[in-house]
Image: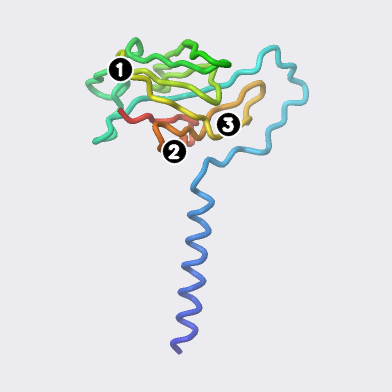
């Protein structure tokens, strides 16, 4: 009687460990169909907000925000120098975003030192656009939520 219990327990633990492995990254949609769309421009999007390191409270769109969109600057690396890119505000979805994301970027909050960003994964799950969904921020991997938004900690 002890052996079937051990087999079931081992199978269950294997199932749980395999499931956790697949949840480690963002799962891009693969059923995108845009046959009649002619892209005049192709956007590389990054949707984000800034949260408190300790509490997780949204510092831009939460109650009693301590940051404004004017406090945030985003840079992308083109060849050698970093170039500032426009950061837009979406008050309805409570996020900041850029249409000019690249693999290597830097984030600056309130004129402090640059925080370096490396986009590890983009998903091309919209016609004429791709979205950054996995970003390494100061050595930590951040994965976008279901709305493709990254939460940077400050």
Of labels 3 and 2, earlier in sequence is: 3
Q: Nearer the viewer, residue 136 or 134?
A: 136
Spot occupied by residue 143 in the image (x, y as percentages of width and height): 46, 37
Per the image, the residue denoted by label 3 is 122
Per the image, the residue denoted by label 2 is 141
Spot occupied by residue 101 in the image (x, y as percentages of width and height): 53, 20
Q: Which is more foreground, mark 3 or mark 2? A: 2
Q: Nearer the viewer, residue 113 or 5?
A: 113
Drawn side of residue 32 relative to residue 133, left or right: right
Identity of the residue drawn at 22% across and 21% down: 64
Of labels 2 and 1, earlier in sequence is: 1
Q: Could you give the CA–CA distance between mark 2 and mark 1, rounded to whole angstroms?
A: 21 Å
Disc 1 is placed on an element classified as: loop
* Image quadrant containing the N terminus: bottom left
Per the image, the residue denoted by label 1 is 112
Answer whether labels 3 and 1 touch (C-beta < 8 Å): no
Spot occupied by residue 32 in the image (x, y as percentages of width and height): 68, 33
10 relative to 90, above or below: below
Disc 2 is placed on an element classified as: strand
- Extreme-front residue of the structure: 80
- Extreme-bottom residue of the structure: 1
């Amino acid at each position: 009687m002890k052996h079937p219990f051990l087999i079931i327990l081992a199978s269950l633990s294997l199932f749980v460990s395999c499931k956790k492995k697949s949840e480690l990254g963002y799962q891009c949609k693969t059923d995108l169909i845009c046959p009649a769309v002619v892209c005049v421009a192709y956007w590389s999007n990054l949707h984000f907000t800034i949260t408190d390191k300790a509490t997780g409270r949204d510092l831009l769109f939460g109650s009693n925000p301590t940051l404004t969109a004017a406090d945030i600057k985003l840079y992308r690396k083109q060849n050698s120098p970093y170039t500032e890119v426009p950061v837009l505000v979406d008050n309805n979805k409570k996020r900041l975003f850029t249409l000019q994301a690249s693999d290597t970027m830097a984030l600056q909050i309130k004129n402090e030192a640059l925080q370096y960003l490396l986009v590890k994964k983009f998903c091309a799950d919209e016609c004429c656009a791709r979205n950054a969904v996995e970003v390494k921020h100061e050595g930590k991997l951040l994965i976008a939520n279901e709305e493709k938004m990254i939460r940077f900690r400050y």
